[in-house]
Image: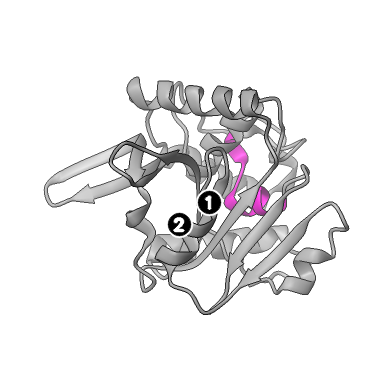
Amino acid sequence: MHDDSEWRADGDRNQVIPVTGVSNREFLERHAQPGRVGLSGGRTLIDRAICRAERRLDGQRQWSAWSHAFVFEGRRIDGQHWVIESDIQLHRRHIQLGVQENRIDKYFDGALYTTLAVLDFGLAAAQTTRLLSEGLDLAATHARYSLRELFGTMLALRHPRLRGRTNLFARERSLYCSAFVQHLFRKAGLDLAPGVDMKNTTPEDIARAAAPYTMWRLER
């Protein structure tokens, strides 16, 4: 995992603000704004597998803190903040696989989502509108979550020469979480990971974005 001093080593362009003594709910409700990016990590097998694979992006081979990325949509008529994300949701016998809208209360469980951060890239209003419009269009047209593309990204992490090339398992209208976030930001005119194929983008790439940001990071 990364400590704050390591994050700040990137230079003055990024500001990391540690937040302590609050719950997931308090943290997210305080910092959620339309167009901001959320990062999360957890203790499930898939979370740990992704964080372990991302160690190849770190000079010290430390595991990443991040296994999932999403975009805040804003507060809606129900008074709740919502997010747009590409994810796998299991609700009893119903499986929701792909780009979808969810309330941020999904992330309130601190035992399930053990690490959280919110990134503000300082988007202009027009960029935020463009980004969210593209996300809503992908949700409405049922863009899929691609497990096979995720495996392609894992392979590219093992063989860095593949990172800038088309994902070996790329499919039409398929995006896993961080590839979805990168796609939206490119639509808004901002490339978070230059030189990395969109469908090889990891949550750690988002956390190490080339574009300047302010990050609020929840610390326990």
Q: Residues within 10 Å of mark 2 (few under 14, many from 20)?
A: some
Determine the residue located farthest toward the right in the rendered image.
11
Q: Which residues are magenta?
A: 199-208
Residue under the point 76% across and 65% down: 7
Q: Position of residue 117 (x, y in %)?
A: 57, 60
What amino acid is at disc 1?
Gly
Residue under the point 52% across and 79% down: 21
Q: Position of residue 144 (x, y in %)?
A: 37, 31
- Which mark, residue 38? 1
- Secondary structure, mark 2, is helix
What amino acid is at disc 2?
Glu
Sequence-first tag of 1 and 2: 2
- Which mark, residue 29? 2
Residue under the point 31% across and 36% down: 77
- Secondary structure, mark 1, is strand
Question: Exactly how many numbered labels are in the figure?
Answer: 2
Q: Is residue 118 left or right of residue 26?
A: right
Q: Is residue 134 left or right of residue 212?
A: left
